[in-house]
Image (cartoon, helix red, strand yellow):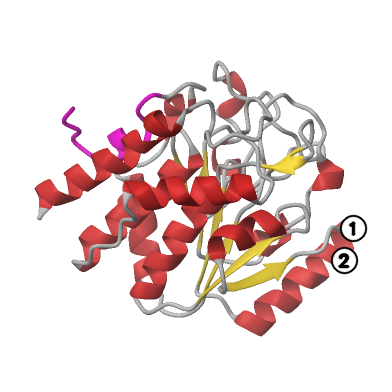
Amino acid sequence: MQHESIEDIILQDDQRGISSLRPHLPANFIEDAAEQIIERSGKVLIVTGFYIAYAGASETDGPPGAVAIGQALEQLGHDVAYVTDKWSLGVVKAVAGDAEIIEFPVATHFESAQFANELTAAHRPASLISIERAGLVGDGTYRNWKGEDISKFNAKIDHLFDQHPYSVGIGDGGNEIGMGNLREVIPGTPKLPDNPCVTTTTKLVIASTSNWGGYGLVAQLGLMTGNDLLPSVEQGYDWVKRTVEAGAVEGMSGEAKDWVDNRDPEADAMCLRDLHEFVAAQS
């Protein structure tokens, strides 16, 4: 199937209605996000890790996309570190390997803001990127796609984004960091939460699954810099498999299987296959 844009590819097979938000974003939102990142040299902090409370485990969506972005940025000369909390630390380590991983404490808002201040001062990040990370909703809690309160399983990493002028949020459900950009629109959209995340980012990327949004960003970074940065389909699956071996679950069912957001490995591979075809056609 021929696609006209990276946005088309990452929003295909939309099962949760996230593409309804597309008219409220720039038509080239992927290029917008990639351009902002490329324009700023220096360290990039990548935030991920979404805890599935009813399964007692972190999910397969997020860390693979985070590492795809991180490795692409390293090839472009950026220093990269990943930020998560204790609930997702093992899963992020499983795919990030020897990369720098910062554990953000699960603490009060005051303590979290203080830690975010210290982190920003120590690393002076050029950019922040969040991919599939639960964000604060209007009532001060964190909630999953079912609307359940998962606050005790979520470090308040939002405070990091409150303090930074150049950030990107990647999400697929309306409750992730960055979705605050569209918090007035999301409640009226079928299938999306009535209480969306209120944490904003400078740029927002939406996708049918957040890993796909990460891969789309990598494809765009490659096109803009003339580099082949996309992971292979096999690499993408290996990352998912490694998250499961580290204890992750598929987010919809809560089952320990190598699926992502209700998609088996073959269905999940569709995005990377199409991105490779798209990039090759642009060369």
Which secondary structure lies at badge 1?
loop
Q: CA distance from mark 1 to mark 2?
A: 5 Å
- Screen quadrant of the C terminus: bottom left
Mark 1 surroundings: few (<14), some (14-19) or many (≥20) residues within 10 A: few
> Is residue 6 covered in magenta?
yes
Find out whether residue 158 is within the magenta segment.
no
Q: Position of residue 5 (x, y in %)?
A: 23, 39
Q: Residue at x 57, y 18 (%)?
A: 191
| Outermost residue to the top | 190
Asked if 269 appears above or below 37 in the picture, the reply is above
Q: Residue at x 47, y 44 (%)?
A: 211
Q: Position of residue 200 (x, y in %)?
A: 60, 49
Who is closer to the viewer here, 212 or 241? 241
Q: Which residue is mark 1?
A: 108
Give, as a three-letter code, the residue at label 2: Glu
Using the image as rendered, state which of residue 208 and residue 206 is in the foreground.
Answer: 208
Name which residue lies at 57% across and 74% down.
98
Q: Which residues are magenta?
A: 1-13
Disc 2 marks which residue?
111
Q: How many marks?
A: 2
Of helix, strand and loop, which mostly describes the magenta segment? loop
